[in-house]
Image (spheres, rainbow, N blue to C red):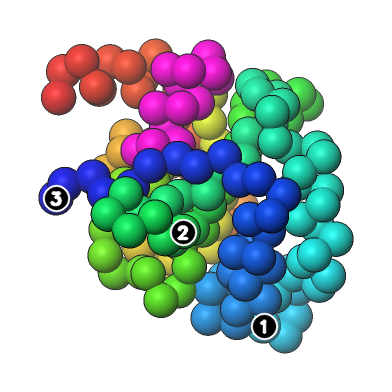
Amino acid sequence: MPNDLQIYIPRPEDGWFYVKMMSDPATMAYNAPWFPPDGCIPAPEAEWLDIQRLWIGKEPERFYAFLQRKSDGAFVGDINYHYTPERGWWDMGIVIYAPERGKGYGRQGLRLLLDRAFKADGVLRLHNDFETARDAAYHIHKAAGFREAGTVDGILQLELTREEYLRSVTTA
């Protein structure tokens, strides 16, 4: 599958897309246990201002970007990572806007995140966790080289080190 995505560092005026995603129940359904009833982020406009102030241009401690389709410039999701010093890893996230799911963008977006983290920003270890029932997320992470680090209360822990990733890229 050709890679039709690129990383786009959003400007303040691009916040409409973040607000749209965070307010969409289909996109945010995975988040419902933390933000009942539908997972939508309360006050996404205020959170967008915080992202601009605290995340944009703060690499390698924090990174946030949109995933943008090259062919038409449309935003299809977002990616992020941030350092968690008490764990010695960078927690990461990827969200694909619900109407854009099923098109391979999760796999492409994860690959862009990994390249950015490990090749550009020198991140040493990425970590992600999510419910064991999220099969699509599990499969794209495993295909990218993540290994299981455990399961706690139905939450799957996955990790990938810079060394593991770079080794897999050179042998692929």
**Amino acid type of the residue tagged 3 in the rendering:** Met
Of label 1 and label 3, which has the lower sequence position?
3
Q: Residue at x 65, y 65 (%)?
A: 16
Q: CA distance from mark 2 to mark 1?
A: 22 Å
Q: Residue at x 76, y 24 (%)?
A: 85
Label 2 belongs to which residue?
Answer: 75
Residue 28 lies, in percent from the top left, at 59, 72
Tag nearer the camera, 2 or 3? 2
Label 3 belongs to which residue?
Answer: 1
**Is the residue under label 3 in contact with that under label 2 (CB below 8 Å)?**
no
Circle 1 residues within 10 Å: few <14, some 14–19, many ≥20:
some
Residue 85 belongs to magenta span:
no
Residue 124 lies, in percent from the top left, at 54, 17
Label 1 belongs to which residue?
Answer: 38
Tag nearer the camera, 1 or 3? 3
Q: CA distance from mark 1 to mark 3?
A: 32 Å
Tag nearer the camera, 2 or 1? 2
Q: Quadrant of the C terminus?
A: top left
Q: Is residue 83 above or below residue 41?
A: above
Q: Exactly how many numbered labels are in the figure? A: 3
Q: Residue at x 82, y 52 (%)?
A: 49
Q: Residue at x 62, y 40 (%)?
A: 64
Q: Is residue 106 above or below residue 87?
A: below
Q: Is residue 35 visible?
A: yes
Secondary structure of residue under mark 3 = loop
Asked which quadrant contains residue 101, the reply is bottom left
Q: Nearer the viewer, residue 154 or 2?
A: 2
Asked if residue 159 lies left or right of residue 59, the reply is: left
The boundaries of the magenta stretch are 111-123
**Amino acid type of the residue tagged 2 in the rendering:** Phe
